[in-house]
Amino acid sequence: MADFENDDLDELDEESVVVMTDEEGNEYYYREDMIIPVGEKRYAILIPIDIEDCHCEDHDCDCDDEEIDVYIARVDVDDSGEDVYVDPTDEEFEEVRKAYEELMEEEDEAE
């Protein structure tokens, strides 16, 4: 993943950037594409942001509409009311995947 400069992040809408940190302290940057409600919980579809690979002036793009891997995260709320993104269980992941596929099928049918 690319290392970002503060100026690069300032160009993106702060609310749409999700920073995930792995066990080794490496930061990964994602753009929240959509929220999918399943039951009483919310799940975010997160798309990796790699500004260095993007050649567009508008970094909030899908360069060349390449197929990309998305990340699914459950959106919980912490004690201070802030959204916290956590890994879903395997069961939750499958439920969200099915809901996402149904949404995409509906969009395709509508076009």
Image (spheres, helix red, strand yellow):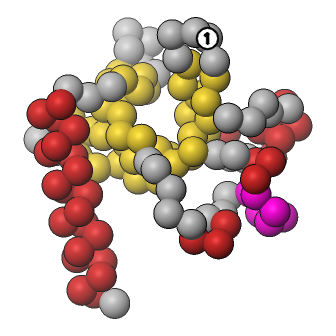
Q: Which residue is mark 1?
A: 25
> Which of the 4 image quarters holds residue 89?
top left
The quarter of the image holding the N terminus is top right
Which range is magenta? 54-59
Q: Is residue 4 left or right of residue 27?
A: right
Kindly identify the residue that appears in the image at 33 percent across and 25 percent down: 87
The quarter of the image holding the C terminus is bottom left
> Which of the 4 image quarters holds residue 93?
top left
- Residue 41 is one of the magenta-drawn residues: no
Kindly identify the residue that appears in the image at 26 percent across and 57 percent down: 100
Q: Position of residue 106 (x, y in %)?
A: 22, 76
> Which of the 4 image quarters holds residue 77?
top left
Kindly identify the residue that appears in the image at 30 percent across and 82 percent down: 108
Q: Is residue 48 left or right of residue 9?
A: left
Kindly identify the residue that appears in the image at 61 percent across and 30 percent down: 28
Q: Position of residue 21 (x, y in %)?
A: 56, 19
Query: Magenta stretch: dominant SS?
Result: loop
- Residue 56 is one of the magenta-drawn residues: yes
Along the line of sight, the residue nearer the viewer: 64 or 10: 64
Q: Amino acid at mark 1?
A: Gly
